[in-house]
Image: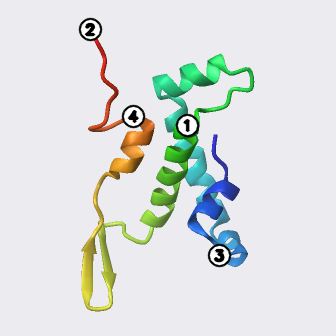
Amino acid sequence: MIDEARVGRYLRLTTQSATADAELLTDVCDAVNAWVGRLDWVAEAAAADPGGAWPPTADQGATMLAARMYRRRNTPSGVEAMTDQVVYVPRRDSDVDQLLRVGSYQLPAVG
């Protein structure tokens, strides 16, 4: 499971900015932990580990997803304006999909 400190380090938040948005960061981490924890392969791995730890790929994917959701507050319509340029924010992040084995990335299966 991820926590606010891990996501804050990933985002390189300063103490001041992390404190200002602490509630938002907590809400995002709670939502991501709940969603990732329900993925079958993560739940199975956590159940098999005595400490209930997630696999490293799930931890990294959850951290990246939480960071994306935290930053998403700045682009609610999916558009980021930077001075005279407009950048469209993609719906999905293929790296997160791959790490969490969701979306268009799935492990091959038989049957």
Mark earlier in primary sequence (2, 1): 1
The image's colouring method is: rainbow
Number of residues whose C-alpha sits closer than 10 Å to that of mark 2, classed few (under 14), some (14–19) or many (20 or more): few
Q: Residue at x 55, y 51 (%)?
A: 63
For label 1, the residue is 34
Secondary structure category for the residue under label 3: helix
- Residue 51: image location, x then y, percent: 74, 26
Q: Dots 2 and 1: beta carbons under 8 Å?
A: no
For label 2, the residue is 111
> Quadrant of the image for the C terminus?
top left
Mark earlier in primary sequence (2, 4): 4
Q: Residue at x 41, y 47 (%)?
A: 96
For label 3, the residue is 17
Q: Amino acid at mark 1?
A: Ala
Q: Residue at x 63, y 19 (%)?
A: 47
Residue most extreme to the top: 111
State whether residue 45 is above or below residue 56: above
